[in-house]
Amino acid sequence: MALAIHVLTGKAKGQEYLLPEDGDFIITSGGGEELCFNEGAGKPLAVLKAIKDQVTLQDAGAPEGVFVNRKKCAESPLKEGDAVRIGKTRFMLVKVIKYSPVAKAARARAADKGEKVAAPAKPAPAPRTSTKAPAPPPPAVTSLPPRRDTTALKRPLYELPESGTLQEHSLGELLRFFCAAGQSGVLSLMIEGDIGAVQINEGQIADAFIASSPAPSAKRALYRLFRWKHGDYVWQPGEAHPIEPSLQGQSLQTMLAEAEAESEAIEGLLAALPPPETKLAVGNLPRGALAKLSPPEMFIVGLVRLHGTVRAIIDHHPENDLVVCRLLVGLLRRNILCIPTTP
């Protein structure tokens, strides 16, 4: 099985790099905050050691350390779907499939080693008609051997309690566990004064919501729940639930990696914004100032005039929360937006 890393952020976002079957893949520092992937230039920051299908990540001098699924580590084995952060660049380990960007390179490597893909079997020729009387049918089987119990093969390699705290097990860890087990049910999260839930349908995330602040879509509610670092959780097995439109066709591992990345990146922006129920207004600007704004900034100004509060502006914006918060912070710092002194 060929493995690759899929880059989630930075200038190389969306690119994939094929890992060696046996050998080292070195990640080095590039220009600024960017990384170089196995290009032989710059200071080594981390090393991916591959031995057949086993991959191990080692910190080789990254200034802020290396994080695997949000946990800092000096060395860690990696499995498909694990998310890694080095500096501000995030990537995850993926299996090379038919439509992967590096699929051609993986096939070429397999060909060099003499590995061949089995050709499809030719269809058997149609039987000839015979004038002879058909043979009598075989005797009916009165009993069948018992079917092999395969439930043990579907069990996860480790167990998590059905209730506990988010300090012990993060939301990402919980979702990876219950989805990998192919379960259906509701994962309820409780913090002081609020409750949220994630509905799972046979190993797929089907719905998500937050009681105190309904999000415009289930996907945005799910990403917001990743900001809950403290509180309790309870898993309740149940029946399957229809998948909400915003979650249909979404890759589980990609979605969880994006949610974790947004959760980390948005913390500082939320701290720079006023409380969610604060009403905003357009500042007292000189003539022609609004004409100099970019289209995304003008869209924010329109939302301020229509909806007013920070929460409503974020909820009514079609982009993700991270994009909206960056625009709001920038407009507030430039005094394009302000908090009115009178109601």
Image (cartoon, rainbow, N blue to C red):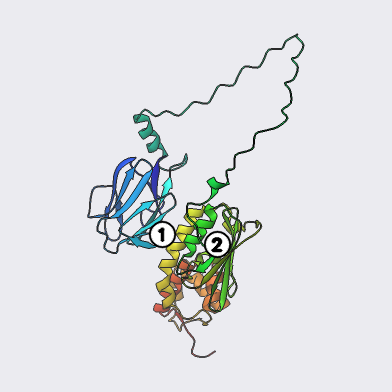
Position of 72 with respect to 226 (left or right) is left
Q: Nearer the viewer, residue 318 or 208?
A: 208
Mark 1 element type? loop
| Amino acid carrying mark 2 in the image | Lys
Q: Which part of the image, by quadrant, shows the N terminus?
A: top left
Residue 217 appears in view: no
Q: Which residue is mark 2?
A: 219
Mark 2 element type? helix
Separation of residues labelled 1 and 2 (CA atoms): 20 Å
Q: Position of residue 188 (x, y in %)?
A: 57, 67
Q: Where on the picture, by quarter, is residue 234?
A: bottom right
Q: Nearer the viewer, residue 68 or 91?
A: 68
Local packing at callout 2 (Cα closer than 10 Å; few below 14, some 14-19, many 20+) is many
Residue at 37%, 45% in the rendered image: 54
Q: Where on the picture, by quarter, is residue 73?
A: bottom left
Q: Nearer the viewer, mark 1 or mark 2?
A: 1
Q: Which residue is mark 1?
A: 69
